[in-house]
């Protein structure tokens, strides 16, 4: 019996690829890498990044060598701490070089275009001046196209650079022939011009305007396209800029500043008003409000105090804070967000994979068409000038640039905008799946509700003490309890009472299963489960609390029942609006929770959810998802706990709350960084807008070639117009994608719909 060798472990390596100009380049790099055993690659034209999955025994250097053998520059990523500055420097240098080259090209090309297009300005021997000005454009300005075309020729491939190079060379070579051998160099030569090719008048004709306009318009398009593409990645760069470079540490030596790389978990650092939080941590001293808008998209500052968790990148808007670091470097939440956005931008949608496959054969087909057009026109007895015009127009107009940019630019803009709104997606497949979802399974605790006990209602008997005093006394006794109910009562007392210290408690005692007691201000205070006969007001409140699935505690003062406090989990402020808006988008909500039936039904009633599944085990939730999918539903699951991980992984789309367990976030395709369920609606609408933008881009990219190539073949497109149209097509695709950067969620939160079943702005349920 032959032993089966274990499958080789796969690892993922990112490679920076230079020199790609169109979707045909993308296809060639992917095919070259795919020829290596066990290697698959996804190449992104907009970012110039190849994400390669390969066996561990395949060295990254061999991947780089394979890309270089395909005729492109390749390099492994620089170290993480150098990557940001290196990328910024590289972009600045490239932009400056492109701008200088474009400026020189325009200064040389514009006089040639003007003289060629305006016969009245054609002075004696004007054609020789144009030739002198056009030569540097056709050689120096177009040199990058020529080099890449020759490199492709050595590897028996053709790209957009091949088309541009051939068009420029053909135009300039014919013009040189006409000047030196064809009679166009004589004094007094005049040349008419028309945007539409016309029959020859028998005189020599120059194509210097085409020889300069093709490089000029292509370089202009590349420059504008580059600026726009850098704009699509602005959100990712803004995330990187949130990372602190230095941090002020407080230790036994006092306060001193150190580089952020030297900060260790457990060290205490200082965050002064107006400063950015250096890394994830927990407040040890001080109170303040922090602005999380740039990290999670939350518009309102969040109040923090001792024990509160802080996210690196947030801005301290209030007082001085001392913070103990809980995560540093790649383990911080900001680093994870940046990593998710980067990974999402490296992926490909199904439509883009189709476009790349088409582009892989598009350029060779165009070359064949250009040769066929030239031969047909000459064979039909047409003038050689007209035949050359049609051939050059076909070469220039048929460029697959727009095909290669249609999807990645939209994805870059959308994922960056999503990160600003608190929506983190793993890749384009997530957006495609999100657009198709018609059923969403919602967890209760921690997803629709806050996940922690909160005082829902206090009912106090009329008397001398009053409700505020009773709550203050109960909170004082409960501060010694570690039970969640006791902590909820204490927090409520602090929130609703005065800012002074709580009163002292003596004779404190805790009875498991019953409650706590103690003496405060000379009064014996007991807080515990209701028992015995209650006054009518408190009995009525107890019945209402039980109907709402709340837990009630009775407060006795010197043995007399004074108040009933109902405690329970509360709905997140946006839960009702989120469920209502999901329903308006045509998505059916389903509630699945491991909690008891009464709390589950109370939540469902408050939110208007008709389908409820209570006491669901992790296996039960996964089985529910499978059943829904078998029924033809496209299912998304929203959860935040370990018990949701199996259902998240088994759904068409798994969505994790940002504040949930790491295992849930790891199993999810999409993470709501703010922990706000209403962000899910924004995610659905953003996904639909993004897929609509991609479809529009691809329709334009395909439609442009379907219309312009036949026009060029029949001689109705001048090469200069063809060059301008080709460049404009790429710029229009990128500009359309850039509109996603300004996408805004519709409506104002908190005004669109009232919150049903609320009290004090929060829906209260168990």
Image (cartoon, rainbow, N blue to C red):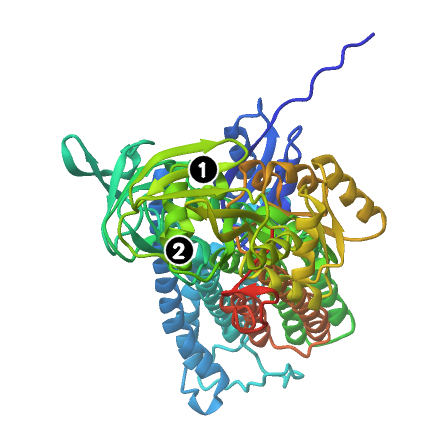
Q: Residue at x 76, y 75 (%)?
A: 381
State the SS at label 1.
strand
On the image, the x and y values in percent for residue 745 come to: 55, 68
Q: Position of residue 562 (x, y in %)?
A: 47, 53
Q: Is residue 618 visible?
A: yes
Quadrant where the N terminus is found in the figure: top right
Question: In what element is the residue under mark 2?
Answer: loop
Q: Is residue 94 visible?
A: no
Q: Which residue extends farthest top? A: 1
Looking at the picture, tell me which residue is in the foreground, 593 or 721.
593
Circle 1: is it few (<14), some (14-19), or many (20+) Cα within 10 Å?
Answer: many
Disc 2 designates what residue? Answer: 292
- Residue drawn where x is 39% and y is 55% of the image: 292
Q: Residue at x 73, y 70 (%)?
A: 378
Answer with left or right where residue 470 lies relative to residue 588.
left
Q: Is residue 12 left or right of residue 699?
A: left
Residue 681 % position (x, y) = 61, 62
**Inter-mark Cα distance, 1 to 2:** 38 Å
Numbered tag placed on residue 105 in the rendering: none
- Mark earlier in primary sequence (1, 2): 2
What residue is pinned by disc 1? Answer: 516
């Amino acid at each position: 019996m032959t032993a089966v060798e274990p499958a080789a472990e796969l690892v993922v390596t990112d490679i920076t690829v230079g020199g790609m100009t169109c979707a045909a380049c993308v296809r060639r790099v992917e095919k070259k890498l795919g020829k290596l055993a066990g290697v698959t690659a996804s190449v992104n034209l907009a970012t110039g990044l190849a994400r390669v999955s390969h066996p561990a025994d395949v060295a990254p250097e061999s991947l780089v060598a394979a890309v270089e053998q395909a005729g492109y520059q390749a390099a492994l990523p620089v170290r993480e701490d150098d990557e940001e500055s290196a990328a910024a420097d590289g972009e600045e240098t490239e932009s400056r070089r492109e701008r200088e080259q474009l400026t020189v090209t325009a200064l040389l090309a514009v006089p040639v275009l003007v003289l060629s297009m305006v016969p009245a300005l054609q002075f004696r021997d004007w054609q020789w001046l144009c030739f002198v000005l056009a030569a540097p454009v056709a050689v120096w300005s177009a040199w990058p196209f020529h080099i890449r075309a020759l490199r492709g020729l050595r590897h028996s491939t053709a790209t957009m650079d091949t088309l541009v190079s051939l068009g420029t060379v053909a135009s300039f070579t014919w013009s040189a022939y006409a000047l030196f051998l064809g009679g166009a160099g004589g004094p007094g030569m005049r040349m008419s011009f028309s945007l539409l090719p016309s029959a020859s008048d028998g005189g020599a004709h120059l194509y210097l305007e085409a020889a300069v306009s093709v490089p000029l318009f292509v370089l202009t398009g590349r420059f504008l396209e580059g600026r726009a593409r850098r704009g699509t990645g602005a959100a990712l760069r803004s995330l990187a800029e949130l990372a602190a470079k230095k941090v002020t540490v407080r230790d036994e030596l006092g306060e001193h500043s150190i580089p952020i790389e030297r900060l260790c978990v457990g060290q205490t650092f200082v965050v002064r008003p107006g400063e950015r939080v250096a890394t994830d941590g927990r407040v040890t001293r001080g109170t303040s409000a922090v602005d999380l808008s740039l990290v999670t998209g939350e518009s309102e500052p969040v109040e923090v105090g001792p024990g509160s968790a802080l996210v690196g990148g947030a801005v301290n808007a209030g007082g001085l804070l001392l913070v103990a670091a809980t995560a540093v470097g790649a383990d911080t939440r900001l680093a994870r967000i940046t990593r998710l956005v980067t990974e999402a931008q490296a992926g490909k949608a199904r439509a883009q994979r189709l476009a790349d496959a088409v582009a892989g054969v598009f350029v060779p087909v165009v070359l064949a068409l250009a040769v066929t057009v030239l031969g047909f026109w000459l064979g039909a007895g047409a003038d050689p000038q007209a035949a050359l015009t049609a051939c050059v127009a076909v070469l220039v107009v048929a460029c697959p640039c727009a095909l290669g940019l249609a999807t990645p630019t939209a994805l870059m803009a959308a994922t960056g905008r999503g990160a600003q709104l608190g929506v983190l997606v793993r890749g384009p497949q997530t957006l495609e799946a999100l657009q198709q979802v018609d059923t969403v399974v919602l967890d209760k605790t921690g997803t629709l509700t806050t996940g922690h006990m909160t005082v829902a209602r206090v009912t106090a008997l009329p008397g001398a003490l009053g409700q505020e005093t009773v709550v203050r006394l109960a909170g004082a006794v409960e501060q010694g309890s570690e039970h969640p109910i006791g902590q909820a009562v204490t927090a409520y007392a602090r929130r609703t009472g005065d800012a002074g210290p709580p009163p002292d408690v003596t004779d404190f005692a805790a009875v498991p299963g019953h409650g706590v007691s103690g003496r405060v201000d000379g009064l014996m205070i007991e807080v515990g489960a209701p028992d015995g006969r209650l006054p009518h007001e408190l009995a009525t409140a107890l019945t209402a609390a039980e109907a709402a699935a709340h837990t009630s505690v009775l407060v006795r003062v010197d043995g007399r029942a004074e108040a009933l406090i109902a405690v329970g989990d509360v709905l997140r402020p946006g839960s009702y609006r989120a469920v209502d808006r999901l329903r308006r988008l045509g998505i059916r909500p389903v509630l699945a929770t491991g909690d008891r039936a009464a709390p589950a039904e109370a939540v469902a009633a408050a939110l208007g959810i008709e389908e409820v599944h209570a006491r669901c085990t992790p296996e039960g939730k996964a089985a529910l998802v499978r059943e829904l999918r078998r029924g033809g539903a496209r299912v998304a699951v929203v959860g935040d706990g370990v018990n949701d991980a199996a259902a998240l992984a088994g759904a068409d789309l798994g969505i994790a709350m940002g504040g949930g367990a790491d295992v849930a976030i790891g199993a999810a395709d999409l993470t709501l960084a703010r922990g706000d369920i209403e962000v899910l609606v924004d995610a659905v609408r953003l996904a639909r807008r993004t897929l609509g933008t991609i479809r529009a881009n691809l329709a334009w990219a395909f439609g442009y070639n379907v219309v312009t190539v036949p026009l060029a073949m029949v001689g109705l497109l001048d090469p200069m117009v063809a060059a301008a149209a080709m460049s404009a097509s790429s710029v229009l695709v990128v500009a359309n994608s850039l509109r996603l950067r300004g996408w805004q969620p519709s409506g104002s939160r908190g005004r669109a719909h009232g919150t049903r079943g609320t009290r004090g702005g929060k829906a209260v349920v168990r």
